[in-house]
Image (tube, coloured by chain):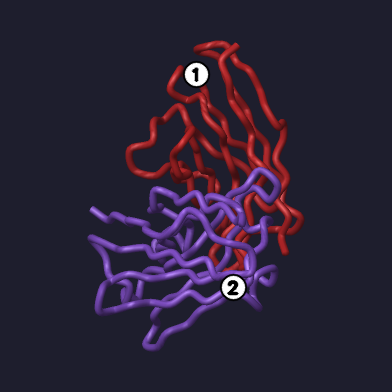
């Protein structure tokens, strides 16, 4: 059974970096049949896909244009997890952040989700 | 980006009655080479992440009750709950996974009348 466990701070100051981690159990971050995604949800923006990392003989990533200049999603094979870094945050980045697995069985529909982390950007 | 538009924003249905949610995409999510619609439906209850209910527009995920069904093709899709149960009170979202950026509808809130 696949499980995603999120960790990271719930409060970040404006202009600083938001950092979250998603630990994977029951699957591998290096799986060639999964992608590892970050999605956020806020009242103003709804559900917004931010980006993903995945392994297909080598590592790939791709990001939403809205955050492309500020975001990094990195795999950590030693800990079987992946992370989100979002730089230069503003109050508009306040949201619930989710990690989620995309499976090639479903051509990357999100079948497993983390529990969510409420992140508030405030001084 | 593909824009997903859901309607209505909310609906109230009596227990045992049918609930119907619509989703329209700004461009087709039907992949011609395999004739599959890259459209998913999710259910979200308060304080929980979304749960995948239906993929490929009409395929129920394992364990999803058969009162949930999806239909449609191309740009117009429907999620139907054939006989609403109390535990179905939730927000429902459609999502296209045809191309990145993956995009979601704005959500439909289903309540008991």
Residue B101 rendering spot, x and y as whole percentages: 63, 66
Residue B63 rendering spot, x and y as whole percentages: 33, 38
Residue A25 vs residue A7, the one in the foreground: A7
Residue B68 vs residue B8, the one in the foreground: B8
The hue in which chain B appears in the rendered picture of the protein: red
Residue drawn at x 67%, y 56% is A91
Q: Quadrant of the C terminus of chain B?
A: top right
Which subunit holds the residue at mark 1? B
Label of residue A80 in the image: none
* Count of numbered labels shown in the rendering: 2
Q: Can marks 1 and 2 be said to lie on one chain?
A: no
Q: Quadrant of the N terminus of chain B?
A: bottom right
Q: Which residue is mark 1?
A: B83
Quarter location, residue B94: top right
Q: Which chain is purple?
A: A
How packed is label 1: few (under 14 Cα within 10 Å), some, or many (20 or more)? some
The CA span between labels 1 and 2 is 46 Å
Frontmost of labels 1 and 2 is 2
Residue drawn at x 45%, y 44% is B49
Q: Which residue is mark 2?
A: A87
The answer to whether residue B82 of the structure is visible from this angle is yes
Residue drawn at x 43%, y 77% is A74
Q: Residue furthest bottom?
A: A58
Does B68 sit left or right of B24 as displayed? left
């Amino acid at each position: 059974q696949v499980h995603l466990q999120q960790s990271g701070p719930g409060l970040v100051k404006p202009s600083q970096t938001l950092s979250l981690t998603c630990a994977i159990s029951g699957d591998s971050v290096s799986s060639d049949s999964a992608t590892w995604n970050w999605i956020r949800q806020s009242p103003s923006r709804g559900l917004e896909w931010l980006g993903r990392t995945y392994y297909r003989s080598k590592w790939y990533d791709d990001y939403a244009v809205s955050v492309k200049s500020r975001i990094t999603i990195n795999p950590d094979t030693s800990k079987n997890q992946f992370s989100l870094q979002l730089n230069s945050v503003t109050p508009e980045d306040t949201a619930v952040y989710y990690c989620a697995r995309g499976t090639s069985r479903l051509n990357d529909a999100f079948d497993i989700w983390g529990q969510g982390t409420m992140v508030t950007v405030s001084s | 980006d593909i824009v997903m538009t859901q309607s209505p924003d909310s609906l109230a249905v009596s227990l045992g009655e049918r609930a119907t949610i619509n989703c329209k995409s700004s461009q087709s999510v039907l992949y011609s080479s395999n004739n599959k619609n890259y459209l998913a439906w999710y259910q979200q209850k308060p304080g929980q992440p979304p749960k995948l209910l239906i993929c490929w527009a009409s395929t129920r995920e394992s364990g999803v009750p058969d009162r949930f069904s999806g239909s449609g093709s191309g740009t117009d899709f429907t999620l139907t709950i054939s006989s609403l149960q109390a535990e179905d009170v939730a927000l429902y979202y459609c999502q296209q996974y045809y191309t990145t950026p993956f995009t979601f509808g704005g959500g439909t809130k289903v309540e008991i009348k």
